[in-house]
Amino acid sequence: MRKSVVIGTRGSKLALWQANYIADCLRKQYPDLTVELKQITTMGDKILDVPLAKIGGKGLFTKELENEMLSGTIDLAVHSLKDMPTELPEGLTLAAITERIASGDALVSNHFSSLQALPKGARVGTSSLRRKAQLLAYRPDLIISDLRGNVDTRLKKLDDGEFDAIVLAAAGLKRLGWEKRIAEILDTKVCLPAVGQGALAIETRADDQTILDLLAFLNDEETRVTTTAERAFLRTVEGGCQVPVGVYGTVVGENQMQVEALIASLDGKVVVRDTLRGSFADAEILGIRLAKSLLARGGREIMISVGCMV
Ligand SMILES: NCc1[nH]cc(CCC(=O)O)c1CC(=O)O
């Protein structure tokens, strides 16, 4: 049994909330364990004025944490699963994926109660191509512009009148106590979430069995299987590319899951979507099959048109 562990985390309010949440879970489970936090700045925290889609690159929010883990200065890292690349560096693994508390995207507005209620030509802020494309597919009249920064910064920009509404992950708002600001959780028919949205990933060294055993209780099996399919889907379509992609896995019966996904053109004019069902044991295969199906039915043309495939 270890006497102490060091958790690595980014310094944003949301990241600290998440790391403290996991620290508290560990302290409750192991009253004799000393749990410390170490703050680490990532590239994604430094570059704040460039749209995420333009920075690209994998591991924007994870790489510095992973380097510290490999060198042993931290024992585990807490991430939003959504920010994790689909392939981990050699020697690291996901020890646990926590229960997803809110998977959807939320519309926040000071004047309007829903996406449908927004007036023609309303200004909507969002940080992701995935949200932008789906919002435009549903409401081509909206003026969507880029909105970066942490959750509080984004809310401030809305409050300052830069936008009529903004769209961000419901999970982040919930964790930071802003749930009451949510006007509407967007239906998955309107906006499919990002891979792993709403779940936390606990990353560790693959050969550190003591830590792996220590963290096993944090794992939520249903979230693990559904996000396994989601990550297999993304791994198959992406090739390190920024293209609007949404995917959402849910449990639909005993050992049965459903995965729904889409690939969209940047302007939302072309949307290719499909849904597959299968058993928990086939999570990985289901994600791969869904990706191949979308690519074959027009997804590949979208990828080629944005330069993601040749
Ligand atoms: N890309 C930043 C990021 N990473 C995780 C979350 C929210 C929490 C989550 O999805 O688990 C957010 C903010 C957002 O997209 O609004």
Image (cartoon, rainbow, N blue to C red):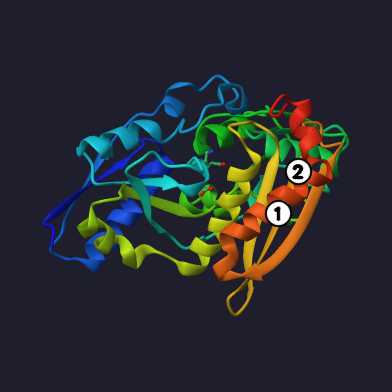
SS for tag 1? helix
Which quarter shows the C terminus?
Answer: top right
Cα separation, mark 2 vs mark 1, equals 9 Å
Which quarter shows the N terminus?
Answer: bottom left
213 left or right of 53 in image: left
Q: Name the residue under label 1.
A: 290
Residue drawn where x is 58% and y is 51% of the image: 232
- Label 2 Cα neighbours within 10 Å, binned few <14 / some 14-19 / many ≥20: many
Furthest residue to the bottom? 254
Residue 255 horizontal/vertical position (percent): 58, 76
Residue 183 horizontal/vertical position (percent): 68, 51
Q: Mark 2 points at which residue?
A: 295
Q: In this view, does 224 lie above or below 36?
A: below
Q: In this view, does 227 lie above or below 309?
A: below
Residue drawn where x is 68% and y is 33% of the image: 125
Amino acid type for the residue under numbered disc 1: Leu
Residue 186 horizontal/vertical position (percent): 71, 53
237 left or right of 22 in image: right
Instruction: Specify whether residue 238 is in view.
Output: yes
Amino acid type for the residue under numbered disc 2: Leu
Q: Which of 118 and 57 is in front in this view?
A: 57
Q: Quadrant of residue 31?
A: bottom left
